[in-house]
Image (tube, helix red, strand yellow):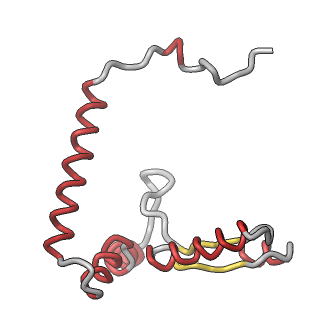
Amino acid sequence: IVDLARGYGMPCVIVDGNDIELAYAEVQKAIEYIRAGNGPYFLEFKTWRWQGLFSGEFRPPEEVKYWKEERDPMRLAREKIVANSAMTAEDLKRIEAEVKAEIDQWINFAKGSPMPDPAKATADVYVGW
């Protein structure tokens, strides 16, 4: 879709959406360009939808294997972090365990909380003229 945006005369970049570091760098460039008053900037992120639109959606097993094993953004980020000696694999495992524990805590909080009052579902949603 980047070609459609080019027709409007704005800078356009195609980014590997599974490379977290590269995606961050490209977003920073776009932000700087826009904040400098240069107008819009278009980023197209190439990636893969992990979940289908419905449970019966067929995807070839080779495609699923490629994207989940070779192009997993988290795996790629872990490998880069360890390769650059920013952290050890053990450091990353410890952080992941801490984050998982916090997520589990919030899930338990949500499950243990009372259901919201359905009558309040539309509160402050419509002006009501």
Residue 39, x across and y down, in percent: 80, 68
Quadrant of the image containing the C terminus: top right
Observer-nearest residue: 122 or 68?
122
Picture mark count = 0
Which residue of the protein is positioned furthest toward the front in this rendering? 36
Observer-nearest residue: 34 or 112?
34
Which of the 4 quarters of the picture holds residue 122?
top right
Left or right: where 38 falls relative to 102: right
Left or right: where 86 falls relative to 90: right
Left or right: where 18 falls relative to 83: right
Which of the 4 quarters of the picture holds residue 121?
top right
Residue 80, x across and y down, in percent: 32, 83
Which of the 4 quarters of the picture holds residue 75?
bottom left
Residue at image x 18%, y 78%? 88
Observer-nearest residue: 6 or 63?
6
Q: Is residue 55 above or below residue 119?
A: below
Residue at image x 35%, y 72%? 68
Quadrant of the image containing the N terminus: bottom right
Residue at image x 30%, y 23%? 113
Left or right: where 8 falls relative to 35: right
Residue at image x 30%, y 80%? 81
Residue 108, x across and y down, in percent: 23, 34
Which residue of the protein is positioned furthest toward the top in this rendering? 119
